[in-house]
Amino acid sequence: MSEVTLSTNKDTVLIPVRVTPRGRANALTGARNGALILSVTAPPAEGQANSAVIQLLSDALRCPKSALGIRRGEKSRDKVVSVAGFTLEEVRSRIAKHL
């Protein structure tokens, strides 16, 4: 398993994610090729999977949903999620607790 490649842009931390919609559970399942692997039970229709991704990361990172946003890849399995209000190291340590 590889490590998640985080980056920063102004006051946000960027997390590359790979999403598996219609999974068995909502969970952080690992890391591969620098991306955080997520599984969500929601289907990829009408933004349901995107909402599930935001909820899952909000719970995992212990931050409000308003601090998260999908920066790139709204209609793709490969996304970049931005996290506002946290340092790179804070996000890295909170992700590490779930992997």
Image (cartoon, rainbow, N blue to C red):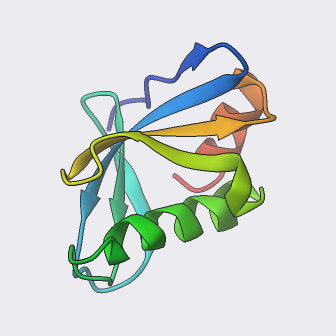
Q: Is residue 56 left or right of residue 79?
A: right
Q: Which percent across, then down, holds residue 48?
A: 35, 77
Q: Which percent across, then down, holds residue 93?
A: 70, 37
Q: Quadrant of residue 90?
A: top right
Given residues 25 and 3, the one toward you in this image is 25
Q: Which residue is drawn at 71% across and 48% down?
A: 67
Q: Which percent across, then down, holds residue 55?
A: 57, 70
Q: Residue at x 66, y 61 (%)?
A: 58
Q: Quadrant of residue 39?
A: bottom left
Q: In which quarter of the image is residue 32?
A: top left
Q: Which percent across, then down, holds residue 78?
A: 23, 44
Given residues 18 and 43, the one toward you in this image is 43
Q: Is residue 10 above or below residue 82?
A: above
Q: Is residue 57 left or right of residue 27?
A: right
Q: How many labels does the image show?
A: 0
Q: Which residue is drawn at 64% across and 39% down?
A: 83
Given residues 45 and 91, the one toward you in this image is 45
Q: Is residue 76 above or below residue 45?
A: above
Q: Is residue 69 above or below residue 82?
A: below
- For the N terminus, give its image quadrant: top left
